Amino acid sequence: MKRLFWLAALAVAAALTACGGGGGSSVPPPPPTGGFSLSSLKGQYAFSMSGLDPNGQYLARTGSFVADGSGNISSAMEDVVDLSLGTPLEVTFVPGKYSVLANGRGVIALQDTSGNPLTLTMILQSSSQGYLLQTDTGPTGTGSLGSFNLQTPTDFAATALNGNYVFDFSGESLTGATPTVVSTVGNISANGNGLITAGVIDTNDGNSGPTGAVPLTLPGSYQLDPANGTTFGRGTAQFAGHTYAFYIVDATRFKFLEEDLLGGTSGDGVLQTGAIPTQNAGFTGSFAYLVGGSSIAGPDAAAARFTADGAGGVGTISYDESNDGTPLHIAQGSNISGATYAIDTTNAGSGRGTFTFTDSGSARTFQYVFYLSSPTSGVIQDVSSGTVADGSFFGQTGSPFTLAGLAGNYAFNWSGVNLSSFGVENYVGQYALASTASNNISGVVDATALDINGVASYPNSGAQGTLTIASDGSTNNTYQITTGSSVSPAYNFQAYIVDANTVLLVNTDSTHTRVLAGFVSRQSQ
Amino acid sequence: MRMRKMSLWIVAGMALFCCTAVGQERASQTPVRSSEYDLKREGTLVGTVVSYTESSTTPPLGAHVALQTTGGVVDVHLGDPRVLTANHLNIQTGDTLRIIGENVAFGSASPFLARIVQKGTQALTVRSERGIPVRYVVQKNGAESKPRGGVL
């Protein structure tokens, strides 16, 4: 049995090394180039993934694996919450295998102690982090996507959770009249000795709507798992009426997974660092953000940028959205009014703030809550009417952006919903960006599509396209990709450049085919 | 826990369809440019199905029904068609439906978004109380789908 499994795993690795033809590709992937190798994945990594299971139920997994730098996963475990199953699972794996190509693309092949496979295509951003896509297509297949980070095992102690952490948990809530999408963002204070002493949390769900800032009224607690804490960095936490498993990346980042079956949510907690603004004057500069979730029409995703003037004013807004496949672009101009922000002085020091603007063209008012994990980055929750969405928020630096300045190798992920099949689509990939004005993207993409027929995998398809930078690049830029994948031959995104290393994407096809959003991250190796 | 919740999700049979007259009850009267789904603005449409499109290309995407009411033909968005199918709510031309929902601005139009659809004695929740479409979920035993909120 195990022999068959590893033969299959090797077959997957062999497919990875093929230079073309994956998924019936008419756009062949280029030969993999770059500086990655098996030794690029060496050490202990925490991972987290979320998506839907074959029943369409929410599923998330968070865990840890140890890679030896030579193609072997020596040990691994995970927590899994699948709302089809109910009870959260702690899963341990037998030793597994992995492969890495020069471009950072590889496969992690695991098998749990019951014989169930877990096959993950990975794209390395560096030797310390990357993206994951589950590519199993059998009964254990899911439509899920995630990431992994190098752990610091010396931080596998309860004392590591010490300070103020900003978090963003998203998924599904079962507590209301209708199971629905939910986003929880906030700040908790851990004392390094098992107590969560304070916090403030904003929850937005599809039943009851945004709560606004809700301070923790009761202390929470956390503890290292006596069995797996020092080996995998696993622990458990209880706060705000919820119970979570967590895996320690290091003292600055924890990966959380809700395990109380009041819903299914997951996300990272990140240590607040730097001078967190406590007044409007402390919040200034250019920012970009990406949010995804649901609206009253259906799946919804948006990317945008704005500037904060240090006095409560928001300007130079550029906004692109795909709301159930209907694109919306907003540019700064006379259509914008009421564009303001406010750093929360009631919960001063929490990093909480709000901002809003009204667009008369679409007759919509956009409202957000954010929590800063640093003076220029954090998490963001969309609390606009009829919307439940959340995502990430970054200081925008380095403009004017040019293709010459951006040229290099990138890892990316896209995630969203196919509006024809109502299925979930997930993608990871790698490409080289050249400084030429056209056809400047060349790389490879792996995709999965989960619909009523189950999970289909589309590995190793070529991806070609063009990033066209508009003006100084600080607002929306066009980003078009053609693939050899049979998921879709073409994708049209709006790209918001955060800095020389990060780009935010939201697709704005006018054909109402899919809602997709994702991240592009420069590789370093 | 989840079985108990199911009874809340599936509203089948919660009310007898006693109104045989084809009409428009307390439909949303307000000229709508709100993009918010507000329970206080909800109205009820009663009418006859002129046409049913399972996967409409008219936004919002998904199932749409053209309902002949006393006030005219109303385009109603029903959400994910698989939720209807899985719950055996088969809609055909000539059916009489009672639909609770409201008009909400979406793009340049203001479609009527259904929250509860009733045909005969079967009623089905297709949106949450904030208007988020429920998401299709397969039941392992092949029974009815649980309505669920959308997750991107």
Image (spheres, grey):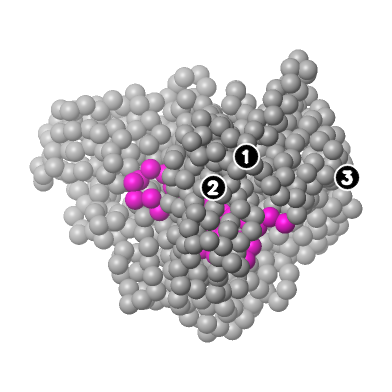
What is the C-alpha distance between the residues marked 2 and 3?
A: 34 Å
Q: Is residue A470 visible?
A: yes
Residue at 30%, 54% (x, y): give it.
B106
**The C terminus of chain A - image quarter:** bottom right
- Left or right: where does residue A511 sit relative to residue B99? right
Residue marked by disc 2: A414
How far across and down, in percent of the image, does residue A399 sit? Answer: 56, 74
Query: Is A58 situated above or below A181?
Result: above
Of badges 2 and 3, the one in the foreground is 2
What is the C-alpha distance between the residues marked 1 and 2?
A: 10 Å
Looking at the image, tell me whether mark 2 or mark 3 is earlier in sequence order: 3
Residue at 71%, 50% (x, y): give it.
A34
Disc 3: host chain: A
SS for dot 2? strand
Same chain letter for marks 1 and 3: yes
How far across and down, in percent of the image, does residue A211 sit? Answer: 51, 59
Of badges 1 and 3, the one in the foreground is 1
Crowd band around label 3 with a 10 angstrom C-alpha radius: few (<14), some (14–19), many (20+): some
Say if the magenta span includes residue A507.
yes
Residue marked by disc 1: A133
